[in-house]
Amino acid sequence: MPSKLAAVALTVEMVRRMMETLDLDHDWISRTELCLQEALLNAHVHGNRGDPERTIYLRCMFSADKIELQVEDQGGGYEPDRQVSNIGTIKPTGRGLFLIRELMDSVVVNSTGNQIVMSITKESKYGNQCYAG
Amino acid sequence: MEINVTQAENHTTIALKGRFDFQAHQDFRRAVDGLLRSGKAMLTVDLSQVNFIDSSALGLLLLARESCEKAGGSVILNQPKDYVDKVLKLCHFDQLFQVQR
């Protein structure tokens, strides 16, 4: 997908509708929708530096037991831990990756920092708790 | 996202509806800045009809809080739905804002 905010919004909407069509767990859909949006925004803003000529690569895998998303940008990477350090402060930025780590069951950032693989599995740390609004 | 602003004597409510995320940036900032310019710094953000919130929106709330407090006011978050409330709690916003549930 092109690295544009409009494409981020459209992609998140498409993926959400796909998950609804597949009749996936409502809690999974809510968590995945937010984490996908955060990952795509990070890729666009921090990875690709808002350059619309760059590309964001997205791979999605859905099954009854697992959702896995891989988001990769064309940037030079970042320090994942730095973004998590703002929680509990009044800084207006830096909560995206924190939310991803809290809401997904597994999060792996590659060594260069430009690819994130995140997943929810049936043996969720959230159990049957419902997040859906 | 829809924004509806209602003003009482010394208090203003911004009611949001739909997705409160990065796409709401300009509209929300414009609404808050307009209120501050007219001397209205006591603000309630009604989240009762918001069904999605992201980290960009959380940042907007913090900026609004900072601006209102500098002007001698405050920001109250009103009736967040279950999902939105969960995100607020995860990010400790219930410690940074008065949240009316």
Image (cartoon, coloured by chain):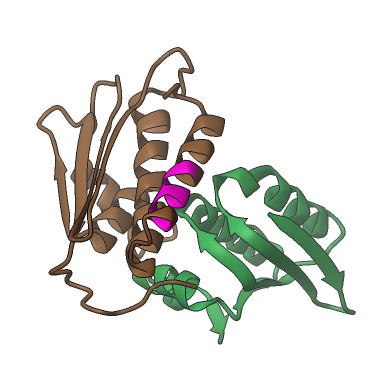
Chain colours: A brown, B green
The part of the image, by quadrant, that contains residue A41 is top left
Tell me the chief SS of the magenta region. Answer: helix
Q: Which quarter of the rendering shows the N terminus of chain B?
A: bottom right
* Of A117 and A85, the residue lying toward us: A117
Residue A16 on the magenta segment: yes
| Left or right of residue A39, residue B59 in this image | right
| Left or right of residue A38, residue B39 in this image | right
Q: Which residues are magenta?
A: A14-20
Q: Which quarter of the rendering shows the C terminus of chain B?
A: bottom right
Residue positioned 28% across, 62% down in the render: A103
The part of the image, by quadrant, that contains residue A44 is top left
* Of A11 and B19, the residue lying toward us: A11
Q: Is residue B45 visible?
A: yes
Outermost residue toward the top in this view: A53
Residue positioned 32% across, 57% down in the render: A99
- Say if A27 sits above or below A37 in the image: below
Residue positioned 55% across, 51% down in the render: B21
- Say if B62 sits above or below A18 in the image: below
* Of B26 and A67, the residue lying toward us: A67
Whole-percent x and y of residue B23?
Answer: 60, 44
| Left or right of residue B77, residue B91 in this image | left
